[in-house]
Amino acid sequence: MMLFSEGFRIFFAAAVGFALVAMAWWLGWWGGLLPDLPSPLAPMQWHAHEMIFGYGSAVLAGFFMTAVPNWTGAKGAPARFLALAFAVWALGRAAMLGGGLWPLLDLAFLPLLGAKIAGLLFKAPKPQQLIFLLALALLWSANLAFHLEMQGVLTDGIAPGLRAGLVTLIAMILILGGRVTPGFTRNAMVGAGRETRLPWNPAPLAILTAAPALALPLALLVGTPETLTAALAALAGAGALARVALWQGLWTRGKPILWTLHLSYALAGLGLIALGAAHLGLLPELAALHLLGIGAVGGMTLSVLTRASLGHSGRPLIAPRPVALAYALIPLATLARCLGAETGAALPTATAGALWCLAFALVLVTYWPIWSQPRPPRAPVARQPR
C-alpha cells in the first residue's frame, strides 16, 4: 500500500488527520456540543497530551523515518516496520480514551521509534545527529511522568510532564529548524542569483540556543526554582530570536514555503521568552503555552511536513494556494488563543480552534493525493541536437 511505502506518507497523513479530529472534538466538548470522553483524564488534560504526544510524536516519526536514511545513506524502514509503528501509535491514541492500565500503551511508541532511529544513526554516527536520541528520551520521560501520576504513582507528574513535553518539541524545533530554515533560504537565494547578504548561521549561537532549550524540559521535570527555569527559557528564546534575525527573512516575502519557517521559528523564540516571564509571574502562562503550542509547534510542523512531502514525492517546492493559506491561519489562531487566555473571552478561543481546524483540513485535502499516490513520472530529458 502506497501509504506505507515511505515514512512521511503514513505519519504525516496520520498527524494531520489526527490534529484535525482531536481539535474538532475538543472544540465541540468545550462548546458543550459533545459529551466527555470515557477517559478518566479531564478533557483539557487529554487535549494537551494528545496535541503534544499524539500529534507531535507522529510528525517526528514521519520526519525521522524520512530524514535519517538520507543523513546516513541507509535504506529506509520497510513497509512492515512502518505498519507496525503506525499500529502502535494508533493503539496509543485509542488507549488514551480509556482508564486502568490501558493508557500505558501510549509509552510504547517512542522507544520503538527511537530504537529504529538509533539503529540507522549508529551506522554512521555524528554527534549533531545523535542529539535527537537525547531529545526523544526527554520526550518519553515527560510522557512517563504524565502517566505515573495518571496511575497514582506520582502526585505531581501530569502538569510537569505536559510542559516538559511541549518544550522538548520546541527544543527540536530550535535545532532542526535552525538547520533547515537558513539552509533552505540560502539555497533559494543562490538559485535566484543572489550572492551577497546570505543567511548567517553561526555555530556558537546555535549552541547557546540549543543547550538551554534541552535543559529546560529536565528542569521542569525535576522542579528547579522558578528563577532558573525562567532563565533557561529566556536564554533559549533570546538565542532563537537572534538567530532568525540573521537569516534574511524579509527576502522570503512572497514565498510562503519559506516565510512560514522563519515566522514559526520566531514564534518559538517569543514563546520561550513569554514562558520565562510567566515563571516570574509577569505574564499568564496559558498564553505562553499556546504561543509555543499553536504558533511554534503547529506552525513549524505544518511548514516542515508540507515541504518535505513535496520534496520527497518529487514535486516542485512551491506551496499550493490552500496550503499557503493554512500557513497564514496558524499565526492568526495563535493570536486569537492568546487573546482568549488574556481576557477569558470565549470568542477568541473558539476562533482559534476553528482556524486550526480549517488550516489542517486544507492541508489534508490538498496533500492526501500526494501521500496516497505514487510519485509523478519524471519529465523526459530533452535530447540535445547533434
Image (tube, grey):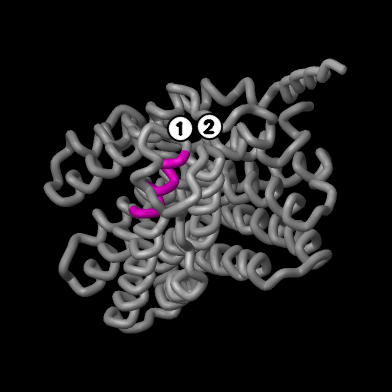
Most foreground residue, 275 or 350? 275
Query: Considering the numbered disc 2 on the image, is that residue within a helix, a strand or a loop?
Result: helix
Is 203 left, or right, of 382 in this rendering? left
Q: Residue 259 in magenta?
A: yes
Callouts 2 and 1 close, C-beta under 8 Å:
yes
Q: Is residue 91 visible?
A: yes
Q: Residue at x 55, y 68 (%)?
A: 138
In this rendering, is residue 108 above or below 95? below
**What secondary structure characterizes most of the magenta part?**
helix
The residue labelled by disc 1 is 20
Q: Which mark is residue 238?
A: none
Q: Position of residue 102 (x, y in %)?
A: 60, 52
Q: Position of residue 28 (x, y in %)?
A: 33, 31
The residue labelled by disc 2 is 17
Q: Amino acid at mark 2?
A: Gly
Q: Position of residue 159 (x, y in %)?
A: 38, 64
Q: Which residues are magenta?
A: 258-266
Q: Amino acid at mark 1?
A: Leu
In this rendering, is residue 177 above or below 302? below
Is 59 left, or right, of 300 in this rendering? right
Q: Quadrant of the C terminus?
A: top right
